[in-house]
Amino acid sequence: MKKAFITGISGQDGSYLAEYLLNLGYEVHGIVRRNSVPEHQQSRIDFHRENIHVYYGDLTDASGLERLLKKIQPDEIYNLGAQSHVRISFDVPNYTVQTNALGVLNILEAYRNACPEAKFYQASSSEMFGSSVDEDGFQRETTRMTPVSPYGCSKVFAYNLVHNYRNAYKLHAANGILFNHESPRRGSNFVTNKVVKGAVLIKKGLAKKLEMGNMDSFRDWGHSKDYVRAMHMIINHDIADDFVVATGTTHSVREMTDYVFSKLGLDFNEFVVQNPIYLRPEELPYLRGDCSKLKKTFNWAPEYTFETMMDEMIDFWMKTL
C-alpha cells in the first residue's frame, strides 16, 4: 500500500485528492492548521475522516514537518497548502510569502532530510505568468513569468526552489502549473462560488445585491476533480518535470456571472454592483492555458466542461441554501 502525505488536505484540492488516492488503495496522511472553530477546519474531509490520518501542522513549522515525514515515510508528498487567495495576498503579503515561499523551502528541506526517495508534487499556479501571454494567446511551460501579485511572486519563488532541489539533490520533485479550478467545495470568497452562492441567495429572496470587483478579467476555469487526477499523473511520471494543467478555454467574470444568473432566470445587471474593495492594486487581465504537453504525455483530458462545472455548483447551493 502506497503512502501519500498531503499538505492542505482539508482544502478543495486536498479533499478531492484524498478521495482519489483512497479509491486507488493509498494510505492517506495530511496536515491541517489548528483554528478555534474545529467544526469547520476538516469539514471537506469529514465523510472520509475514519480513513485518513490527520495531524495538526503548518508549512511555517519546519521541525514539525520533518518530524512527521520521518514518522510516516510517505511514497508521495503533495504540497497543496498555501495562502491561496490572490486578492488577500495584497493585504497580507508577508504572511503569503512566509507560507507560499518559505513554507515550500521548509517542506523541501524536510523531504530531503527525512524521505529523499519519495516523490514530491508542488502546487504551482497560473498566477506566476501574470501579464505574460504568448503570441497565440496562450500561456504554457515556456511562457515568461511576470507575476502581478504577492501570491504570484511567492509561487514563482517556490517553483524555482523545486527546480533547484530537483537538480541539486536529485530529488523527484515536480511542478503542476494549475490554472483556475473550481467545484462546490471552493471557498465562497473565491469569485466563482461567490457568484453562484450570491445568485442563489438572490433567487431565494435572501439577498438583494451582489458586490463584485473586476468583471472584465478572463480566466481559464476547470474542475478540481479533473485537476487532482493530473496531479497524480505528474508525480508518478518517470521523470520529474513541470506541466501546465488547464482547459484551453477562457471566459470573463462577466460571462461567468451572466451564465449563472441566467440559469436561475435572473438578469445579473439588475443585481450586481461593483465595489472597489474587491479590485486588486494590479489586475491580471487574462489567463488561458495550453496543456498540450500534459495531454501528449499522459493522454489526460478534462471530464467537466465549464458549463457542467458551473451547473454542479449551482445545484449544490440550491440544495444547501
Image (cartoon, rainbow, N blue to C red):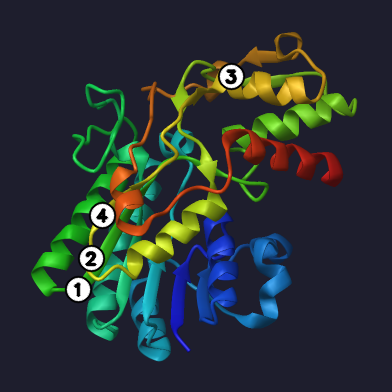
Quadrant of res 203: top right
Q: In this view, does 272 lie above or below 115?
A: above
Q: In this view, does 212 lie above or below 152?
A: above
Q: In this view, does 14 lie above or below 267?
A: below
Which residue carries the number 2 mark?
240
Q: Cα distance, mark 4 to mark 1?
A: 14 Å
**Discs 3/1, front:** 3
| Number of other residues with Cα within 10 Å of mark 4, as a class: few under 14, some 14 to 19, many 20 or more | many
- Residue 171 badge: 1
| Number of other residues with Cα within 10 Å of mark 3, as a class: few under 14, some 14 to 19, many 20 or more | some
Q: Can residue 189 be seen in this view?
A: yes
Cβ–Cβ below 8 Å for labels 1 and 2?
yes
Q: What element carries label 4?
A: strand
Which residue carries the number 4 mark?
242
Which residue carries the number 3 mark?
255
Q: Position of residue 285 (x, y in %)?
A: 39, 21
